[in-house]
Every structure is written in C-alpha cells, then in structure tokens.
Amino acid sequence: MKTYLAKAGEIERKFVLFDAADVPLGRLAVKIANSLRGKDRPTYTPHVDTGCFVIVINAEKVLLTGAKDEKKMYESFSGYRSGHKLKKASEIRAKKPELMIREAVWGMLPKGRLGRAQYAKLKVYAGAEHPHAAQNPEAVKL
C-alpha cells in the first residue's frame, strides 16, 4: 500500500461560505484555517496547498465571549520609534471588523510561502453581501 500525496495540478478548488454572525471568534478561526489548509478533505497533504477558497460574511457580528470586547488588545508596530499602537477589540470592530478574523486565522496558518498562499484565498466581508455569487459557494454550518 502506498501513501497518496496530492500534486498541485490535480487539486480541485471550491468556494466555501462561512457566516460569522454569533459564532465565537476562535471556533470560527479554527474551521476557516482547516478549510484553507485542506485538513477537512481526504486529499490533505501537508506540503501542498490543498485547501478551498473561503468567504466569510458578517464579520462585524462575530462573538467575543466574556469581557474580551474591552480587554482584548490588537497591537501594531510601524518599525519607527513610538510606532507601537494598541487598540481594543471594540475599536477594531467599529473601524475594520474584517481584521479580527484575519488576524485570528493568520495565527493558525503555517508561516512561510505555503501559509501566505493559503492566506491569500481568504476573503472577509463586514456585512452580509459578497461579490462571489458566481462561484456558487457552499455554506458551512457551524
């Protein structure tokens, strides 16, 4: 018996739709990361990008449990002196709600060329509308 290893040319990509409304951020990010990597498919191969394209809608309605809306901090650093910025999750939700999901998913993907290729297949939208209706995304129940 031989182990099956997927090749980059044989992979069939599909579009998957996640609705983030009232779903805890971490649980949602795990499902998204697994789908991007292809870990939810029988053809998963660690060194090949076997995942799907992922569309996330309603990012502004994602759930943060407990007091995380006020206590969770997102930090950025420009590289310059005094370029260190901290923002609360509530501020991020008000200005760029997509960033919360993007950062959570990026932390769960491998770092390097493969991880960047998988991360590029993630599309996050704040509202319920998305421009990918022509790709017929299949909705995933959470």
Image (cartoon, rainbow, N blue to C red):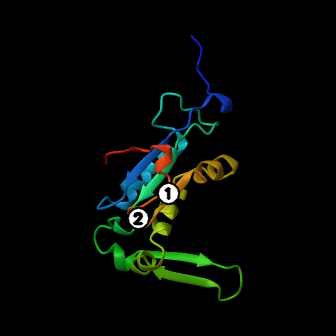
Tag 1: Cα neighbours inside 10 Å, few (<14), some, or many (≥20)?
few
What residue appears at the point 44 percent right and 56 percent down from the top-left corner? Answer: 56
Q: For residue 26, what is the image quadrant? A: bottom left
Q: Position of residue 72 (x, y in %)?
A: 41, 74
Q: Position of residue 68 (x, y in %)?
A: 35, 73
| Residue at the extreme bottom | 82
Specify the label residue 76 is tagged with: none
- Label 1 – label 2 distance at C-alpha: 15 Å
**At label 1, which amino acid type do we have?**
Pro
| Residue 59 left/right relative to 106 | left
Helix, strand or loop under label 2:
helix
> Badge 1 is on which residue?
131
What residue appears at the point 54 percent right and 76 percent down from the top-left corner? Answer: 75
> Badge 2 is on which residue?
59
What residue appears at the point 52 percent right and 57 percent down from the top-left corner? Answer: 123
Nearer to us in this view, 139 or 48 = 139
**At label 2, which amino acid type do we have?**
Ala
Task: Tell which tag, 1 or 2, sits nearer the viewer.
Answer: 1
Is tag 1's residue or tag 2's residue first in the polypeptide sequence?
2
| Residue 66 left/right relative to 50 | left
Helix, strand or loop under label 1:
loop
Nearer to us in this view, 18 or 119 = 18
